[in-house]
Image (cartoon, rainbow, N blue to C red):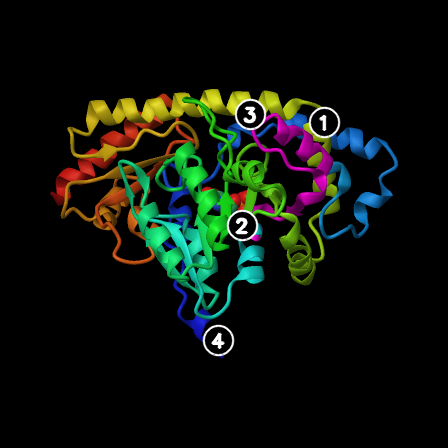
Amino acid sequence: MLSKKSAGIKSSAVRELLKFSKIPGVISLAGGIPATDLIDVEGIDTVLKDILSREHRGLFQYSVTEGEEHLREQLSRWNSGHNLNVDAESIIITNGSQQAIDLLSRVFLEKGDKVFVERPTYLAALQIFGYTDATVVELEYDSEGIELNLLEKEMAAGGVKMVYLTPNFANPTGNTISYEQRVKIAKLSQQYQVVIIEDDPYGHLRFSGDPVPSIFSVAQSLFGKNHNVCYMSSFSKIFSPGLRLGWLAVPEHFHMATVVAKQALDLHTSTLNQSIAAHYIESGRINERVEILKATYKDRRDYLIGSLHEYSGGDITWNTPDGGMFLWCHLAEGIDASQLLQECIKENVVFVPGEVFFARDPQKNSLRLSYSMLTAETAREAVIRISRALKKIK
Ligand SMILES: Cc1ncc(COP(=O)(O)O)c(C=O)c1O
């Protein structure tokens, strides 16, 4: 009875892994989740009490599809301090950035379209594109960044509808797209009328290096309001993933179609949750929290890298990200990270084999290690256990 697309779908390897990570004694480097201990529950409590002490009947009523004005205004103001100049009218509130990707794929993609993505890329974006009739094409990274020459050639040949990019501290690679490449991407998008989806849930979590303007901002400054870049970010990594809140900034000529797609999907995002987020930004607590998150994630990244230096015996190589939550690693050629995971499960440590982040021809020797939940002790113990498991399969 299932549609062909649903029948062909396998359970996500990451979701399966989350079961193991809940077992006591297991150290998980698998979840792409923010640190539970860093969620500002006191701040949320204070904001909630404040909201509920005023007239709040409207917070339990239906709301407008594009999102509460108060939240859109707060986001516009707050983002302008973070390299993204977008007016409140261009913002659409979504149920996380996951929904924003889904909305845009509904708005733009049809049978035969090609979507270009970084190789490797965010697994759940690949899942969304899998539900469309579009074809995914991967762009390699080299020392210069993404393979833009191939992209340009394909655009010139008329074969590109959409490009999906994670510009800051990507999931899974930790890669950041350079300013020069962002300018080039914005120009190509305008020249060949191709939609760019800029998915940026980690951009606020930069703990080293200089911030780079968003592709959206670059396109806006070059071409005014009618560019083709759609930007999205999320409260999930900086506030609370459980509230399911994200925001989407789209140029004017895409706005109505995107709002109508959201209306068809779920009418609007939770009124109460939007109000919590709006007041949280307005209170200024969000800035303090982001500072805490950045400092802690930097420490946790360094614990993991320090332990890899000390205990992995040169058997694992990695990229060092300037922010975000992930270390992208490789084993020697010919060693399969999924096989390593099976041994690691026996050692009570889990990670995500990198192959799930590829649309095709996966790098079997790659793996993603998430450091968001680690302490100095668990980082050390995790690497010792992974190295022990590695010895058994070498
Ligand atoms: C690159 C990327 N995009 C989107 C999402 C979805 O986030 P949200 O919780 O905002 O839906 C994630 C979550 O891990 C992600 O890594």
Which residue is identified by label 2? 98
Which residue is identified by label 4? 2
Residue 83 painted magenta? yes
Q: How many marks?
A: 4
The image quadrant of residue 370 is: top left
Mark 1 lies on a secondary structure that is: helix
Reading the chain from its start, which is encountered first: label 2 or label 4?
4
Marking on residue 41: none
Reading the chain from its start, which is encountered first: label 4 or label 1?
4
- Position of 347 compared to 129: left or right? left
The image quadrant of residue 332 is: top left
Reading the chain from its start, which is encountered first: label 1 or label 3?
1
Which residue is identified by label 1? 282
Nearer the observer: mark 2 or 4; the answer is 2
Type of the residue with mark 2: Gln
Type of the residue with mark 1: Glu
